[in-house]
Amino acid sequence: MNDGYQHQCEWMPVGGASIAPAEHFLGDSAWQWCLVITREATEADLEEFQYIEEVGDHIWQTVIGISHCPFCGVTLESDNTKGEPLEAHFHHIDSSNSWYSRRL
Ligand SMILES: [Zn+2]
């Protein structure tokens, strides 16, 4: 992934949430950007989730296509210049209770 394409702003919370090019997470999508929310395992989580092996492993991750930064409100660069409504595109990956991540 090219981190240079990520949107960074002073309102971005530290850890857990980021904005990334949608193609990396949503594949062939009308959306060009997505909000990625990742719940990473802490030391305490290793006790609770038997399939999580290391601190920092993803317990779950949710991704949704976005047009604006939800933290600073800036319009993210897009080909959809008319601002036409797009169908929501999102998914949730649950890695908490199986060796294999489940995409929901
Ligand atoms: Zn922002």
Image: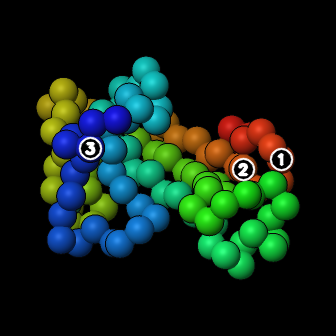
Residue projecting furthest to the front: 54
One can see residue 35 in this view: yes
Question: Where does label 2 land, which residue?
Answer: 95
For the residue pair 36 and 47, the one nearer the viewer reads as: 47
Marks 2 and 3 sit apart, C-alpha to C-alpha, by 24 Å
Residue at (68, 38) in percent of width and height = 103
Q: Is residue 29 above or below residue 53?
A: above
For the residue pair 69 and 3, the one nearer the viewer reads as: 3
Q: Give residue 96's position: percent from left, percent from top.
A: 76, 56
Question: Where does label 3 land, which residue?
Answer: 3
Q: Give residue 23's position: percent from left, percent from top.
A: 38, 29
Q: Are marks 2 and 1 in contact (CB under 8 Å)?
A: yes
Residue at (62, 56) in percent of width and height = 57
Residue at (72, 72) in percent of width and height = 45
Q: Amino acid at mark 1?
A: Ser
* Quadrant placement of the C terminus: top right
Residue projecting furthest to the bottom: 44
Taking the image in four quarters, ligand 1 sits in the one at bottom left
Question: Where does label 1 land, which residue?
Answer: 98
One can see residue 82 in this view: no
